[in-house]
Structures are given as structure tokens and as C-alpha cells.
Image: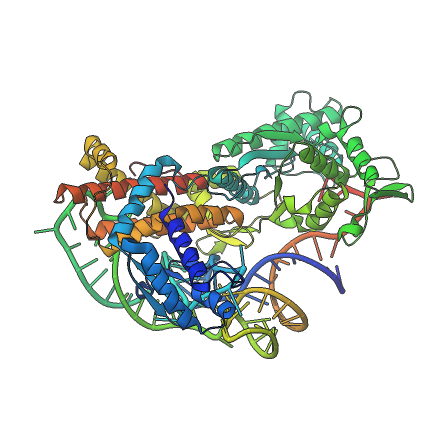
Amino acid sequence: MAHPVDELRDAVERASSATAGSDAPAPKSRPTLERPRQADHGDYATNAAMLLAPVMKAAPREVASKLAEELTAGLGASLDRVEVAGPGFLNLFLSDAWYLDGLAHVLAEGDRFGSGSAPVFEKVDVEFVSANPTGPLHVGHARNAAYGDALARLFSFVGHDVTREFYINDFGSQVANFGRSVQARARGEEVPEDGYVGDYVATLALEIEGAATRPVEEVGDEAVAMMVERARASLHAFGVEFDVWFSEKSLHRGSPSGVEHGFEVLAEQGSSYRSEGALWLRTTEFGDDKDRVIERSTGEHTYFASDIAYAQNKRERGFDRMVYVLGADHHGYIGRMRAAFQALGGDPDRLDLLIMQFVHLVRAGEKVSMSKRAGEFVTLDELVEEIGVDAARWFLLNRSHDTTIEVDLQLATSESSENPVYYVQYAHARIAAVLRKAGTDRVEGAVASGVPAGLALHPSERALISKLLAWPQEAVEASERRAVHRIASYAYELAQAFTAFYRDSQIVDVEPPELESFRIALSVAAQGTIARALDLLGVSAPQEM
RNA sequence: GCGCCCGUAGCUCAGCUGGAUAGAGCGUCGGUCUACGGAACCGAAGGUCAGAGGUUCGAAUCCUCUCGGGCGCGCCA
């Protein structure tokens, strides 16, 4: 069964073609079909006539009138009336019958409603967090984790095949440096300059057996391994799991190693050259501002060599799309990563480099200080402990990833109407309570019997159905724009639409039974969609609160 | 110096692949309540969309410049 809004869109396009005639050139873009903010602009509005007007060399409102006639004929009983408005918009007023069909569609889709709606399915790799294993995960990582995880959930939902990946920087001088810091603590000495401070270093020094006496490389490796385990545990508690934990070190093992293999590919592509004893990558050819060293004159590989090898590894795993969710301080990385990818012969359109902006924590109007230097920063664990997983994920996700955000810890913990996450969860719990009151048998009966025909609907019932019908498109747009925060907005608006319906209409024990069935069925559809949207954010949908 | 992100209501932010009177939450002010969960609902006040040009029938949205804020620019990772 086709989605009713898709059918509407098709009807508009058919009417457009009919109005334009077969010999007219195609308009420059597809007509929009949107839900106007104002009720007197109809249930849906389209700019089709305004797109057609230049093609037909006629006044937009005249075209609109013709189009209106076509649409009236094409849509039949679905349409109550159509109006020409403003510069040539067509406002469509749909019948209650159309809305009832809409609800029937939602119910028929069941758990699948809105899923698998992506225009093309891709094999996607989402790499996120990838925090250095030399310190605890902090609030910035929390935002990255919440976003990457929700994006991965969203991708899966719309039909992509998703791999979630964490890149472990367990190679290079930082590991040795970390080892020296832990060893110094174990020996009761001062941490070396540029070393790692913070209580967790002292804790590691106690936990690693023989930390004071063993070779410093071993201490470093073990400390890193323990930090990775801690990150894994913290992320698990935050509701985030990975399919692949990819070790940077593994790129330097074997013969040829991943790095050597990457260099071979670059050489085949003619993208590298030797100068001043070092091996350089010709990234300027691909828009970088300067060429980059990948192998130092000492023979050591730079971290960039690892990045190249890693990118090549991903390419060879056959992903259609590779998403990197990067911290705010990584935008310098974008140009050279894109260049490196092209230097390997890759298509840069398959690469998505997303930058997460900063998080500022606020408590009672005061900024919470986050000084990494002093080893004082709010960790992911502390954030979860203070405000809980649901509130943390909601507040980290309800804003666009490319804007800095403030999270008010007090608002996030307040269990009241001020707090949007509770508002949405409350709507879900309230539906659960209403359905409990109706009883399982009654609810199953209402859903199974199908949506009754011939009911006259209340505006808030139409509004709720309309909001539900928007879900598949919302999910696809959020996915295509990497705009996870739209899911949060949608969840909130859906909760509002349900709450308005609940205010206006008694659900259980209303007469006649067909009306009760309809309202129960509508509640079931709303509950399922709220739960789904919350699940994509990683926020729970409680049966009671 | 070069580059990236941002600048929209008192605050926090949506809206940005161009559409009608620019929205939400919080805050402020004023109301509502014997239906299922008041963690609710209704209403009001509040905006030169940083500024200036440009493109367009139409610009918060696209382009250019200016101003302001954040961040980044290593043979460190």
C-alpha cells in the first residue's frame, strides 16, 4: 500500500503534466508538497503552478486554476476542495476519508512504518568517538557518541547497511608518553613535561602490576588497553555499541603492512614523491593548502600515514559511504583527509567528514569549567551519573551538530514540563496508560478490525494523523542531511499533536464503538511512532513514569 | 596571514538544496480544570533574521564584502 502522501504527490505531478501538455519542457524543479503552518492554507500546499507558469508562459494563478481542475478530477473523494492562493499556491483541503485511509496505512505498516524509505540503500561506515586512549571520555566525546550512534540508528532505519567503528589511536609517540606518565606516577615521581596528568593516571599506576619497573613500552600498551576497555564500558552504559574497534597499530604490522600497502597505492596513483629525505603526499593537487609528509626523513611514519592506510582499508572493505564524525578541533583534518582520499583514487563524494561543535555545560547559569590541562573535565560517566542517559542523549542531540550548544544540567534533571525529554516520554507513558485502561483485547481488536469508514474527524485528530504521515519523509530528510536533531524536533511535535488530540477527545469508553476503535487505533499509531523516534535517539520510551 | 563553523525573540535554539504573516522550548504576564496520568492545556507581550550590496516574481535561506564570536593551521597525535 503506497503512502497516502506519496499518492498525493503523484497526483500533483500527474496533474502538472496534464496541465502543461506533452510538448511543454519540464519545469526546472519538482513541485513541493508541504504542510502549511496556517490552517487556512489547507492540509497540504504545492507550488506546482508557479513552477509551471514560466514553462507555459502564462500567469501563475491562471495555471493554478487549470491545475486545480485537474487535481479535483484526479483526487476524487480524497479532496474536499482546492484553492488558488497568494502568488499561485494551490492549497489542498483533504477529506476525512483521506485521513482515515492515512491512519489505515500507518497501522498496516506497523513496526515498519517509516523504515526503509531511503531512495537508495548504501553500505555505510560510521566512524565516531575515536577518542585518544590516553584519557577518559569527556562531554565532547559524549556528544560525538550520541550523534554518531543516533546517525547509525537512523541510517539503519531508512534502509542502509551500517558498520559502527571506533578507531583506536594506539600507535605513536603519545602511547610512549602515556606510558612514561603512568610509570612516573608508579614511581612516585613528577609526571614528565607534556605528560598526562589527572587522577586516572595515578589509578592506572596502581592497577598495572609492576608499572614502576617494567619496560615503559609495556606499561604504555597496557595503560592504553585499559583505557580502551574503560571507554568501551562507558559507551556501553551510554547505550552505544561498536561493530569494529580498529587498532591503528594493526596498520603497522605484517608484510606488507597496511601503511606500506597504502603507500603502494599512492605510488601507483602517482600521488607521492620524495623530497628532503621525506616521503610527501601531493595533497595540493586535491585542494589542500600544502603537501603533507607521510614518512619522515628518519623513516618513521607520520600519523597521517596511518590515516591514509586506514582510509584505504575502509575503501577495500567496499563501503559506498564513509562517514567520519569528528571533534570540533579537527576541522584542519578535513582538507587533507579529502585530499588523501582522492590521492588513493577514491571518490570524495563517498566521504562525509562531519564536525561536531563544542558543548558548554551550564549549571545554574554558570559555565562549568572544562580545563583539560588541569585534568578537570566533566567525563561522560559523570554526565550520565548526573542527568541520566535519556536526558543526556536528548540534550546532546536536539540541536544541529554544527552549532555549539549549551547544556543546562539543572534543566536536564528537572522532572517537569520545562524539560522536553520528559514531555515526550510522558506522552508515550500516558498513551500506555490509556491503552491499559482500554485493555489488551480491546486494543488488539481495534487495530485488527481496521479503521472504520465514514467518521467525521476533529481537527486535532486530522493534525495527529497528518503528523504521523510525515514521519517517513522526516526520517529520510534527517538521514540525508545528517540532521539527527530533526528527529528530536519531530518527536516533540508528535508528542504535542497527541497531547492536543488527548485534550480534545475522550478515547476509552466513548460511543459509538467505531469511534472508540478509531481513537484507540490512532493512539496505538502515535505510541509506536513516538517510541520509534525516541529509539533512534537512544532515549527510552517508558510505559509508566 | 590562511581555512572551517557560527551570528534569528530576554535566554537556549529550529527554520538555511529560495516560497505566503520568521517558529519552538524556557523565562515574563494573564487565564483554564469533575472525561483516560496536571509531568497538562489556552492566550498575550517579545524580532532592523549582525550590517551593507547583489541575484530572483519572491531571500533568514544563494553570492560578495564588512563587523563580531568560536576553533584550527607542525617532518606532534
Q: Looking at the image, which residue sits at the far right?
A: A276
Q: Judge left or right: residue A142 versus residue A4.
A: right
Q: Position of residue B71 (x, y in %)?
A: 65, 54
The residue under the point 44% across, 49% down is A474
Asked whether residue A105 appears in the rendered view, the answer is: yes
Q: Position of residue A332 (x, y in %)?
A: 70, 51
Vertical relation: B12 (above or below) A340: below
Q: Quadrant of residue A183?
A: top right
The residue under the point 77% across, 23% down is A254
| Total number of numbered discs in the rendering | 0
Residue A521 versus residue A25: which sits nearer the camera?
A25
Residue A13 versus residue A118: which sits nearer the camera?
A13
Residue A344 versus residue A180: which sits nearer the camera?
A344
Q: Which part of the image, by quadrant, shows the C terminus of chain A?
A: top left
Q: Looking at the image, which residue sits at the far front?
A: A23
Residue B11 versus residue A455: which sits nearer the camera?
A455
The residue under the point 44% across, 40% down is A536
Image coloring type: rainbow
Q: Position of residue A521 (x, y in %)?
A: 25, 41
Asked whether residue A500 appears in the rendered view, the answer is: no
Q: Which part of the image, by quadrant, shows the N terminus of chain A?
A: top left
Q: Position of residue A537 (x, y in %)?
A: 45, 42
